[in-house]
Image (cartoon, rainbow, N blue to C red):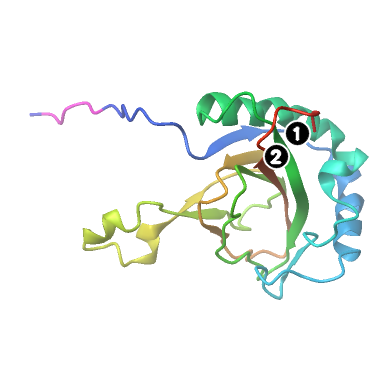
Amino acid sequence: MSAPKLIDVTPFEPMIVKAHYDFDWEVLRPVCQKMIENTPEQVDVENEFGYSSVYNYGDMPHKNPAFRPFYSWLHDVAQHIIKNEWGYEPNFEYSISNSWVNIHKKGGITKEHHHGPAIMVVATYLQIPEGSGFIEFKDPLEYPKAMNMHYDVDDWVWKKVKAVTGDVLLFPGWIRHRTETNNTNKDRWVLTTNIMNMNRPPQQNY
């Protein structure tokens, strides 16, 4: 007797959404490099082979003209997911609070963390060479699944999401995540954006 055909009918909202945007990396590379070089200090979520512009408040990507086409595209995508897929109040404003770029050289990682009160995090692969590692998410049902006899194995708790250059991942700020190690000699570049609930009617688009 053949196995029955099973169809996933889970009716809840999607948690991690993937889209795609084609960047002109030759234009953006020097812009991103400058952001990194002008950052006064590094964040401790990166190891010694990773660098971030998160503390470069004077030159955040979403306020840099070089990224304007991407953020114009992202606006409608993010608003649709927040209001229509995730069910947040449609009459509130959801705006970018901050953005930054990360570079992971060989051996570089971003350690486990979350983005606190951010409604949405947007992780965008500006460059992800083959074999340079992916983002991993921690199962939010870790504790309910603790009865599973295999759930103390790291692979059961953490799951990677594969991506290519130009892929855009949109996910809630509370979900814990980290990256795999970049084991190549090519740099992995990621653009990260936090979108917050401003708890007020929209003032202006970002």
x and y, in percent, of residue 86 in the image? 51, 31
Contact (Cβ within 8 Å) of mark 2 with mark 1 = yes
x and y, in percent, of residue 157 in the image? 38, 59
x and y, in percent, of residue 28 in the image? 87, 45
The residue where tag 2 is placed is 166
Residue 20, picture quadrant: top right
Q: Amino acid at mark 1?
A: Asp
What is the chief secondary structure element of the magenta stretch? loop
x and y, in percent, of residue 202 in the image? 74, 27
Q: Residues within 10 Å of mark 1 (few under 14, many from 20)?
A: few
Residue 38, picture quadrant: bottom right
Secondary structure at numbered mark 2: loop
Is 163 on the left or on the right of 145, as rendered?
right
Residue at horizontal 68 percent and vertical 51 percent from the top: 128
Residue 174 vs residue 180, the one in the foreground: 174
Q: Which residues are magenta?
A: 2-6
Q: Residue furthest bottom?
A: 48
